[in-house]
Every structure is written in C-alpha cells, then in structure tokens.
Image (tube, rainbow, N blue to C red):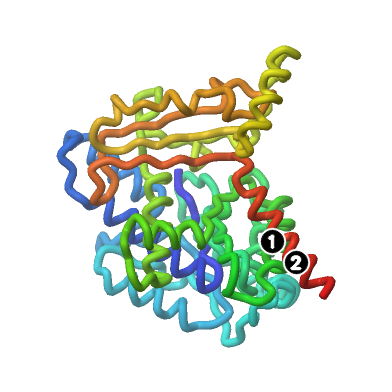
Amino acid sequence: MSIVTVQLGQCGNQIGFEVFDALLSDSHSSQGLCCKRENEAYQASCKERFFSEEENGVPIARAVLVDMEPKVISQTLSKAAQSGRWKYGQHACFCQKQGSGNNWAYGYSVHGPRHEESIMNLIRKEVEKCDSFSGFFIIMSMAGGTGSGIGAFVTQNLQDQYSNSLKMNQIIWPYGTGEVIVQNYNSILTLSHLYRSSDALLVHENDAVHKICAKLMNIKQISFSDINQVLAHQLGSVFQPTYSAESSFHYRRNPLGIDWHVRPSLSGPSSLGKMSLNKDLHFNTSIANLVILRGKDVQSADVEGFKDPALYTSWLEPVNAFNVWKTQRAFSKYEKSAVLVSNSQFLVKPLDMIVGKAWNMFAS
C-alpha cells in the first residue's frame, strides 16, 4: 500500500523533506535486535509505501510539492538530491512567483481555483504510479496563506475526486504568540474546512515541540530545522512498519490502522454514572489511543495504565479504544522509543484560546 504525500507551503515542504529523510535514514540504519529477514522486510515495506525507484536505483519520494513562491521548493529539491540517498520526482512540483501574503482567503479563493487543474494533475500522475494506492498524507501549516488556504482547497478537491481514499492532514499549530498577526483567523478557517474534508488530523503544536528542543534536547539556539527534525522523527516512528497482533508487519489500508470513527454501543446506566464522575476528574478524555513501541525491551513494557477506563469517554470500553504495536527493530539512532497517537480532547483548550483571540481581534 503506497501513500502520496502532498507538501504545501514553506512549512509543509520543509517538514516533508525532513520526514522522507528520516524515513530513509531509519530504513538504512544498522539494527542488531532483529534478524536479517525481518530487517529486509522492514526496508521493503518502507520503500513501497513512501518511495518509487528509477532505473539507477535511487528512491524517489511519492510526493507533490506545492508553493506559490519558488525559493523553498528549489531548496527542498536541492537538499534531497544532495543527500545522495533519495530525491524528489523531476516533474512533481508546482510553484509560482507570487505568494499568498499570509492571506488565507487569497490562497483558498484565488490561488487554489486558479491553479487547481495543474496541481490536481500532478497529484493524479503520482497516484497512477502506485501499484496499490492507500491514501494521501497532506503536510501544511495553519497560520500562513499558502499552506493553510491552498491546503484546505486541495484537501477539499481530494475529497471530491478521491472520496474512497483516506486523507490525513498533518497540521502545525502556530505559536501562542508571534508568527503571523492573522494566524488565529487563518487557523479557524483552516480547521473549519478540514473538518469537512479530511479523515484525520495529526496535530503538532509549535510551542510543545519548542519545549522538547529546549528542555529534553538542551538546544540553546533553536531553529526551525531543529523543530522540523523532531516532528519528522515523531511522524517517522508512527509510519514505519510494526508488528501487530496478527504477527506481521502492520500495514492496513488506513496508514495508521487506528479507528478514528469509533462508535461502539453505549454502556449501561451504572457505567455511565461512574464514568461521568471520572470525566470531571480528567479533562483529557480520549476516544482512541495507540501506543507504538520500538527497540529494546518492548515485550516487557508496561502499558496497563492506558487501559484505565477513566481515560476514555463514557460510551466506550477501553478494550475497544486502546491498541499497542511493537517491534524489536529500533527506530533510527534510538535504543528504544515510544509514541502515543491519541484521539482526545487535548486540543480543546488551545482551540478555545485561538477562537477567543480571533473574537477579540474582530471586536477591537
């Protein structure tokens, strides 16, 4: 199953490069915890999903790059080619000479319709190269004009033209202060459109990733490159192959395999009463959680805490809401790693803040 990645705007293209680089770097890293056969299967699965190959054997990212200014795309293409490990397709990018000026409406209502045919043709050609097509991974920001405005427009078109294929958007939540003066407007407009056209949103907050760089990695002068590399490693650890309960490298039609539309039967009255009390004690109620464990000691890792009913909504049993994937093959340079993918209320408070700031600006 192959995924076509769509990189939109400066943010989407810079992160997209780091994601592909992290995936291939991990695929080529030496591993001592798994046998040769398993490692070869791991590498083959990664390449099938994210890369195609030319006659010279150089992997080509299954990606389309879109920006309204040429600078970032030119830099991204050059960095990939200079790596010597992989590259982007020769005709897989679309750029113009006029940006969107952080104007969401200009990206969505002007650039989007004006260049719709050209962008969608590039995406169609990339999809046609896949022997078995799974869906789209769309990387974009929420705060700017091109990534957010055109990103929302392209996602809507993908929903119209590929309604049966999964569309997963990886979006970058803006810093609480700074960046773009109209970022709160742009963010609300982006989310309101993606809510109708995307199947899943993978959200990273710039403030949270910045703290990781500062407190966990002890980086003194934090750059966007540092932040993007952290994002890429987190995404890579989610998307790379793992073993599931079926004892095979875990690839479903859904790139994550997590059920984002869980709707089991409601619990009985007594259970509902108990859960309503727990809900008051725990703000961050979840619908579904997926833990991905890689590397040393994964079989002995204790994940019982994620089965606590207090973590989940009242109409959902933990057995239906929690899953864990494991593989002894370590990710990249890490001896052991754990990633949590959570469908929860975590973003309710940040969203309330953005909506509040937007209303305050509107009323001022």
Asked if residue 165 is positioned above or below residue 64 in the image, the reply reads: above
Query: Is 37 or 224 nearer to us in this picture?
Result: 224
Residue 248 location, quadrant: top left
Q: Position of residue 167 (x, y in %)?
A: 59, 50
Q: Secondary structure at mark 1?
A: helix
Which residue is at the front of the view, 165 or 202? 202
Q: CA distance from mark 2 to mark 1?
A: 6 Å
Q: Quadrant of the C terminus?
A: bottom right
The residue that appears at 59% across and 65% down in the rendered structure is 176
Tell me which corner region of the image, top left, top right, bottom left or bottom right, holds residue 111. Answer: bottom right
Coordinates of residue 175 in the picture (x, y in percent): 56, 66
Find disc 2 in the rendering and name its residue. Answer: 358
State the image coordinates of residue 362 (x, y, percent, origin top left).
Answer: 81, 71
Q: Is residue 72 left or right of residue 182?
A: left
Which one is in front, 330 or 87? 330
Question: Three-letter amino acid code at disc 2?
Answer: Ala
Residue 170 as seen in the image, left or right of residue 105? left
Out of 293 and 261, give the one closest to the viewer. 293
Neighbor class of circle 1 (other Cα within 10 Å; few <14, some 14-19, many 20+) is some
User: In the image, what residue occupies the spot 64% across and 43% down?
Assistant: 164
Q: Is residue 314 above or below residue 337?
A: above
Q: Are marks 2 and 1 in contact (CB under 8 Å)?
A: yes
Res. 161 in view:
no
